[in-house]
Amino acid sequence: MAARIVTEDLIIAGQQKNRERRYWLGQLAGELADSRFPSDRVAGLEGEGGLASIPFDFDEELSNRLGEISNHSDLRLFMVLTAGLTLLLNKYTGLEDVLVGAPVNRQQEEADFINTVLILRQKVQDEMSFKQLLMQVRDTTSAAIQHQNFPLITLKDQLNEELPEGRSFPFRTAIVLEELQDIDYLEPAAPEMIFSFRRENGRFIGTIHYRTERFLPGTVARLGGHYLSLLAQAVKHADIPHVELDWIPSGEQEELLHFNDTVADYPHECTLVQLFDQQAANTPDRLAVVAEGSSLTYAEVKQQADRVATALRHKGIGSGHILGLLPERNSKTIVALLGIMKAGAAYLPISPHWPANRVQEVLEDCDSPLLITPEVYRQLLTVEAEELPPVSHPNDLAYVIYTSGSTGKPKGTMIEHKSVVNFTWGMWREIYSLYEAPFRAALVSPFEFDASIQLIFGTLLFGHTLYIVPEEARLNGGLLLDFFRYHQIEVTDGTPTHLRHMMDHLQYGEDLALCHLIIAGETLPPLLAKGFLERFGAKKPQLTNAYGPTEATVNASSYHISYEKLATMQRVPIGSPLLNSKVLILGPRNQLQPIGVPGELCITGNGLARGYLHRPESNLEKFQVNPFAASTAMVDEGRMYRTGDLARWLPDGNLDYLGRIDDQVKIRGMRIELGEIESRLRALPSVRDTVVTLRKTAENEDAHLCAYVVLEIPVDVADIRRSLAEDLPYYMVPTYLIPMDKFPVTPNGKIDRKALPAPERLQSSSTFEAPRNDVERALADIWCRVLGVEEISIHDSFFERGGNSLQITTIASHIKRDLGVDIPLREAFIKPTILDLAAYVQSAEQKDYTGLQRQEEREDYPVSSAQKRLYVLNRFEGIGTAYNIPGVLKVDGPFAAERLTVAVQSLVERHESLRTSFQFKNGQPVQIVGEPVPFQVERFEGFDTQEIPALIQAFIRPFDLTKAPLFRVGLISISGQPNLHYVLFDLHHIIADGVSLALLEQEFIRLYMGESLETLDLQYKDYAVWQREQVQSEEMREQERFWINQFSDEVPVLELPTDYPRSLNKHFAGDRLQFDLPADLTEQLKSFAEQQGVTLYMLLLAAYNVLLHRYTKQEDIIVGTPIAGRLHSDQESMVGMFVNTLALRNRPTGDKTFSQLLDEVKQHAIEAYQHQEYPFEELVDRLQLERNSSRNPLFDTMLFMQNYTRQPGVAKGLTFTPYPFTHHAAKFDITLEFHQEADGMLLAVEYATKLYKRETMERFSQHYLRILEDVIQKPHQALQDVSLLDEEETQNLLTTFNQTASDWQETGLIHQLLEKQAEEYPARDALISEEGILTYGELNARANQLARHLRECQVGPEDRVGLLLSRSQEMVIAIYAVLKAGGTYVPIDPEFPTDRIQYLLRDSGASMLLTQRDWREKVDFSGSILDVTDKEIYQGDPSNLPSVTASEHLAYILYTSGSTGQPKGVMVEHRNIINFLHAMQQEYPMMASDTFLLKTPYTFDVSVPELFGWTIMGGRLAILKEGDHRHPKAILRAVTEYNVGLLNFVPSMFGAFLNALGGNGQPLKLLKYLLLSGETVTKDLVERFHRLGTDVQLDNLYGPTEATVFTTRYPLTNLQESVHVPIGRPIANVQGYILDGQEKPVPIGVVGELFIAGAGLARGYLNQHELTTKKFRPHPFIEGERMYHTGDLARWLPDGNIEFLGRIDHQVKVNGFRIELGEIETLLYQLDGIIEAVVVDQVDSLGNKQLVAYYVADRLIEPTHIKTHVSRFLPNFMVPAFFHPLTEMARTSSGKIDRNSLVSIPIGVQKEAVSLAKPRTELERKLVQFWKQLFKRDEVSIDDDFFELGGNSLAAVELDLALEENGAIDEAELLVYEHRTIRLLAEHLESYRVQEDRGGD
């Protein structure tokens, strides 16, 4: 009963809150992603707003589909809708971690409100299907509902670092189902968006409530449409990965087409030079280019370009060549590039700033025949221009521009003329056409960047003037503005960096003529754009934000910025696609993304580059086939370019650029967006601009975040770091903050990140000041060790001296260890100097130990937590001496008994614990310290040494806790040996522990020798008072939080297989085994532990977890370990109960390596040790675990290393030696105890003898030692591969247990058995039925005649013939006829539904159907149909046919139910059946005079021995009348009438058969064998049969259809020691294997999966190759053979029998406890009147699993009576919630109980109301009165459960004492644990009283 005690202490709201708090802290642990829909307005700038609503309607199809999926359950519907919303958030945000809020279910009374909000957190992985997500949402929602009564708002402070800024809850989006929930409950959470749903007229209506300051109505309406579209696709394709869903709404597809409606004509037949020449002809005298104080007209540019082209042509340079051009910023560059193109070549601009080797590299890459330098240019101009025929084509290259490559080598992008022309015309439409020609445009971009293209040709092709900005002005804001003023520039280009440079020198835009700036190349922040435009006052230029990669010809999109919108913009859009360009936003599987949903930006159209020069792999990767290409003459859509940029469509057709897909960095597993850190920095008033990078300070070091900042005002970088630490997680705070005057920029104006200075480990920047006090010195020492420096100033910054975020965690751990202060990481960040940190440490609360105080004397004292538990435990019946601590000292030498008494008396006076007793007062146990009284030593004189063990056992007796001392001492004197004595000690655990015993023995020796011991200032009672006070301390509450969090989820129950059934109440009888670990193994273990950095205990514990995992297949295991609990010096000399227990939880999974598990065990053990002071008893109280009185709370097994030793004592001629003996008690199921010895280690295994046999524990121990040996040799192997078995056990399992080989004299074919008997005994009766009798000769002849008919119908070997026949002689004849013809019979029950019959005929491929006239019209069959009742077919030759069949040919195909819903056909061969028939005859010999009964329908394989078994010995077959197989009395009449010798039954039908016998076994006198199969056999059923007293052999048989009927057999004789009825050993030529998940043998007694091999294996499944391959596996131990995977759980028993434990896929678990339903059914059968009973697990409409019992009774039995009965014997969680009476059990056609039909019977949610049952007797009235007082209730029913009313262990003690005081019981029993209602308790007490009275008589 131990488990009951500790699980039933005070059940109060506070405890529940702790449990729920534990759950929510676990659920919200770690970094919380801010999962929210992208808003339309900037956060913080929205102003006042409110809530608005937009509805959206589900169509009828989706509404109906949701109703079907949810089974019309509101809760399930809510889960489906939540899964849809979760997925939508994932699509919009890309986050795997998605949080959604929801209100708790609607409450009835507002007073009950504790919490109104639930947080539903999901992990959405890419490959997850919607079905998998839905299952996750189901589990998350169910768990959240179970823990909904915790006020989540109270977690705000604890979660503060993870909560979004200014939020109390971590979600921003919520969901409501109005039928279930109230939207007002969400008010405290203030979500910014709520998806609300309701039913209306059979359809669903959705409404989105949103914050108007965050979202626009159009965005919200679109979200509603997206939700519907995504949900519709998700439920339709629920099994595919969600990333493959194509969920874009049809209406949006049209919008996207419109967004990309860019098709327009342009001069696609012209080259750039042709267009320039046309413009030059139109405006020859207009200024074309102005640079460096000189200018050229269009005519001059053309003339000089023609000269360059002519010169190049003379050099043989033309089409196909790429010419290097080293440009200067003057007009010559324009002329040169035009001349190159006129020659037919492409130009390659090379920066004059490039290193020489890079120039050489690109020239070689493009095979340039010439590099045009200024000198070469001058030479080219000396050639006179000639009239050159045009050689360029629009598809020719215009230029090649090199960009940086990911490989480190630059790559050349090839751009054709037509692409540039298309781009230029696109820019004309967007920008240039807005201004009259000629306008003045300033070229800021360098020539080597493609941004230069837009203004070079944007001016020269349209008659504008291009002004080239000189180099010195390009990157100098002041000079640039001067240039613009001087030339009155109207249009220019640039980057955001240029805007920043100009802002420094710009006040009111004075004297500037700027009309338009084209900005590109970097992200343009809205605030920068706004600030720049503000400098112009009322005359603001137009800003266009352009976007495009080089590979798409400069720009692919553009956006004209509206100044008025900038204030509310989060980002400046990159606009809509340019002319003849299209943009695709694609998802992970290349599907189009809906509007607003992020994806990769891909570009297609006329702007695409030809590709990369000489980079075929890059071309394949980046330029891919466009899956959405449309056929248009104007636009080339065949290819698309993958930009690697992340973007989304906005509703207005603009594109929102979100960053690079690969622009994320990871630091120690944390995913970081550098842009987020930059945004936070830019938001600081002191920071003008910033760049954040990931940099290394040295080659071999980890990379760290480095932030470069340009400051607005001088500020200490420590202040910046402090500000960041306020808003960012510590790992996102840059290690290095480097101020700069300005950022280096590339020639095109972008920030040159490579030129940023590398961070360095800086020396101190402050004046050195040494530490001044102990705290500062301690911190300095820690810093020096971590940073690797010799000295440090108290003013030095940790980060400036080279520290990083990882080292901060090391600093914090050192401070905790050395100074006892827990310092939050954030504090370490914002206090980066020793001076600041020391002040924090000094002010922080240190963990000081408050010493024990001596208590004033009083009548009684509180007990400690451990004593409280032991007090309650001691009241249980059967506790015996389980909690006694005995010890024996062997004394050699002259020993004086008188001195013994004096020494013991001194001990009693010295230690108050030895004179302490216990009472129960005011509902609590207390301890009472008595005065010293004379102590009596028990004397045992004149005994022999062999009697000592018995004397010791007799000496160990139970104690009465109310009477001191709880301590006894004995002395044994040995007859004839005056110098040999044994001193015996026995203490109750409530006053002492193991250390106390060792202490007492040592003190006893010292006192015996006359020593004086120092006085003890403190006693155990002082500790008990101190402990009670400590439980309320903050430190202990913190430890409590740790332990509660450890068990916040479902607590696992260890399901170790036992030899004996576990009883209702715990028993403490035990025994011990001891093993000596060899010295070499011990040394290897110690050495291995040292290498791994773990203790020896951790290694032993990890190996034990492996053993338990392999024995149970469980992956969540708790092992207990005692810990001394003497943490303080004051306790060292005390006698008392200090031991605490730690519950160590680990998760050994099969795929983990042992090294990984060992690391986890180490970590968990260390954490447990750090929190070891929290009392285990308090933890059990807080957890409120499910009661199971047969188990201990939390764990049933322990492992510990004994850390104290009982040392021998030697003094004055005496030797005191600890004497070993066995204390026959076990507190736990199994305890492993290790003792370190001089030459190795001792392992003692204590085990419960009511559960385990000694030989089982011996095997268990050997397996453990085998694991130890294996894991230290191969620590990196997976746990599933660790070896448990030695060669001997392996041989037993594979060979010895499978010695089944048998040679049959006669083999052959099934029908040949009949033919042989017909030949030898033609006149012998063969077939008997109500139709008459057929002899062997007649039967064989008719079968032959029908077979010939079948042969004539082309039936041959393995041709399938369907049989649709009633039970009759024709059926038997037809079966033999099909076999004789060579065919395969396919039996079909005429009672099957028509659809099933059609399916079987179709799937089997039957070529012919044999039926009877009654059934002919039932089927629509295209093949031949033959009526077997037609007498004409029984004509002709009656002789045997020539055989066309081999033994490996199929005999039948039998269909069994399939997991897919369709039956599957099992193909069985002749040889399978022949072996089976001979094996059955061998096991169950039958004679020619015996009769078989054809009772089983021929569609089931148990019919096989009935149909064919009688032919082996020439017996008879009696055919049971159709339908009689369901009626026990009809079967009984047939047994008597036909003298049947063998019967097959399913156990449930056999129970009904026994009922029909009515206790009279006489009708079975001629029966030889009763064979049970098909269902689990109960022991109760077997015992009922044996009470008949017959000689019939009753056997249990097992076998799947796939292994030919039966494969094992077990004689049902003595079942006393069996937990389950075994299924026995394999039959002849069949082998059984019990294997693990890797198909390796499991040890004897260990549960595994049952596999079958040998002669019975079927060929496989018809038409199901994949399933056949899965179930019929290659034999792992015999090459070339197969074995069948049954899907059943089983284990070997030591005698070679197999114990069946159920289906793998039908495991029933309730509240963490695995339940055997058969155990409950057995109890139901024991109740008078119950004929049949079945227990199933069902799920009610709320999704809760319930146990439901269905029963058939021969009288009226109230369900409450049945519940009362089972409650007496079962723990509460095993008592069915519902008891459902039936008139009869539904059965399958084979006679088995049809459990599926039972499961379909609906059950309710609430238990039926029971009227208040009044007391009926005086005893019941007294108990009712007492319970009212105890629970302070006005009314109590005699059927109320004691513990459900609020009872706990102390209340149970109080009730026990009251019963004892009133004479109802004689001694402590705590009966209420077994009899939990007044009715049950009173009945027990009355029966007890009657027995007492009879005993008195």
Image (tube, grey):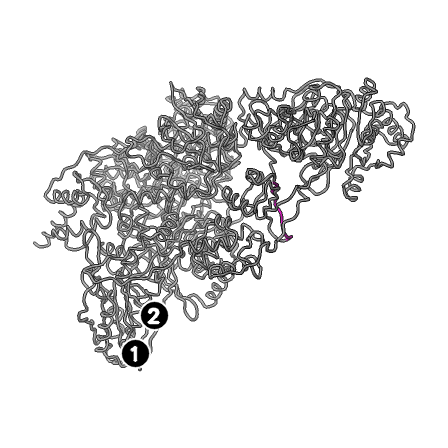
Of circles 1 and 2, the one toward us is 2
Nearest the viewer among 193 and 1166 is: 193
- Magenta span of residues: 690-699
Question: Can you say which quadrant of the picture contains the C terminus?
Answer: bottom left
Q: Position of residue 363 (x, y in %)?
A: 80, 39
Instruction: Of the two numbered discs 1 and 2 on the same chain, state the one appearing first in sequence.
Output: 1
**Viewer-nearest residue: 978 or 777:** 777
Of 1341 and 1632, the residue lying toward us: 1632
Amino acid at the residue labelled 1: Asp
User: Count of labels shown?
Assistant: 2
Q: Is residue 1241 above or below residue 1027?
A: below
Horizontal side of 1892 relative to 354 (left or right) equals left
- Left or right, 795 with reference to 1454: right
**Number of other residues with Cα within 10 Å of mark 1, as a class: few under 14, some 14 to 19, many 20 or more:** some
Left-right relation of 480 to 1733 = right
Secondary structure at numbered mark 1: strand
Residue 1293 percent across, percent down from the top left = 44, 53
For label 1, the residue is: 892
- Helix, strand or loop at mark 2: loop
Q: Residues within 10 Å of mark 2 (few under 14, many from 20)?
A: some
Q: Please tell me whether residue 1830 is drawn above or below residue 99 in the rendered image.
A: below
